[in-house]
């Protein structure tokens, strides 16, 4: 089985063309657990799959290192789009991609070589039922049991955003894990820590629920943070710059008054290496 290793601002992924079912459906979760392991596998923040789609140009699937399938991944989507365009699987730069979060429009921007991918992240969902979260209404500047103020939004997957100072010294994993497992979020949630560094400029660190750790960047988390920064008045422009530990990403917002109608994420994607995997070693159960 042939694979490709990509990263989008440090958020790294294994990509497999699964249109011919080289990994059978019943083994996808196990393959993700084994392949993404940093010591006994290739190592990655997720396993991405290319599949045929009946209602879009191509289908995107992604499995977390814990074996769970995620609805979407912003950084992963950029890598996915770069690959299917670079390798001629899709020959037009404007690509409709099927995901569990719906069909997304992705625009591959060329400048000699591909430098940036623009992803239509859709309309952010703020209602608790669509995050999902317990209770009714929105989660805006709400206090959780440790006293930290949080806001929440679904940008393809659910995210909490909490503003902080001295972001480099914060214990992302300890605080992130407490919020991720808070009873307020029955399906868990990703947790983003955001520090304002200038006019429409922010630094971010993210704890991802499927990884159960901090990642160098999270595209849906960056989008969620930009949306909530705008809604909370921390950002006043419609183009927001976000620096993750793995690099810089931009978010452009389509707004109507104080309502965000749509968000676009713009950032790089890069192939790191490629190789072969012996099938028996990645689909077997660990003893």
Image (spheres, rainbow, N blue to C red):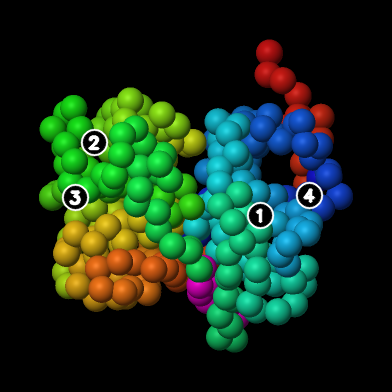
Residue 207, can we see it? Answer: no
Task: Determine whether 175 is above or below 85 in the image.
Answer: above
Which residue, given by chain and number where applicable, does mark 2 sit on? 171
User: Which label's residue is closer to the chain start, 3 or 2?
Assistant: 3
Which residue, given by chain and number where applicable, does mark 1 sit on? 60
Taking the magenta stretch, the answer to whether it contains residue 78 is no
Q: Residue at x 46, y 47 (%)?
A: 157
Q: Are marks 3 and 1 in contact (CB under 8 Å)?
A: no
Residue 102 percent location from the top left of the image: 59, 56
Q: CA distance from mark 3 to mark 1?
A: 32 Å
Residue 195 percent location from the top left of the image: 19, 55
Foreground residue among 61 and 262:
262
Q: Residue at x 34, y 67 (%)?
A: 260
User: Which label's residue is closer to the chain start, 3 or 1?
Assistant: 1
User: Which label's residue is closer to the chain start, 4 or 1?
Assistant: 4
**Residue at the limit of the structure toward the bottom, as seen here:** 112
Closer to the camera: disc 4 or disc 2?
A: 4
Q: CA distance from mark 3 to mark 4?
A: 40 Å
Q: Which mark is residue 163?
A: 3
Q: Secondary structure at mark 4?
A: loop
Q: Residue at x 75, y 31 (%)?
A: 27
Q: CA distance from mark 4 to mark 1?
A: 10 Å
Name the image quarter holding residue 279: top right
Q: Which mark is residue 18?
A: 4
């Amino acid at each position: 089985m042939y694979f490709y290793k990509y990263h989008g601002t440090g958020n790294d992924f294994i990509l497999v063309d699964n249109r011919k079912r080289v990994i059978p459906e019943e083994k996808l979760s196990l393959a993700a657990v084994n392949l993404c392991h940093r010591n006994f596998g290739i190592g990655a923040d997720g396993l991405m799959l290319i599949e045929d789609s009946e209602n879009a140009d191509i289908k995107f699937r992604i499995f977390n290192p814990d074996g769970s399938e995620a609805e979407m991944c912003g950084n992963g989507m950029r890598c996915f789009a770069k690959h299917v365009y670079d390798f001629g699987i899709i020959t037009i730069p404007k690509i409709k991609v099927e995901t569990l979060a719906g069909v997304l429009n992705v625009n591959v921007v060329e400048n000699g070589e591909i430098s940036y991918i623009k992803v239509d992240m859709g309309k952010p969902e703020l209602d608790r039922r669509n995050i999902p979260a317990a209770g009714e209404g929105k989660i805006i500047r709400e206090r959780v049991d440790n006293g930290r103020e949080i806001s929440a939004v679904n940008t393809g997957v659910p995210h909490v955003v909490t503003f902080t100072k001295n972001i480099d010294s914060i214990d992302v994993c300890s605080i992130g894990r407490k919020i991720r497992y808070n009873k307020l979020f029955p399906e868990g949630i990703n947790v983003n820590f955001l520090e304002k560094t200038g006019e429409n400029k922010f630094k971010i660190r993210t704890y991802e629920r499927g990884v159960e750790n901090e990642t160098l960047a999270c595209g849906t988390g960056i989008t969620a943070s930009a949306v909530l920064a705008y809604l909370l008045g921390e950002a006043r422009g419609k183009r927001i710059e976000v620096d993750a530990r793995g690099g810089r990403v931009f978010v452009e917002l389509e707004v109507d008054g104080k309502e965000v109608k749509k968000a676009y994420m713009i950032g790089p994607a890069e192939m790191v290496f490629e190789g072969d995997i012996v099938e028996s070693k990645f689909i077997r159960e660990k003893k």
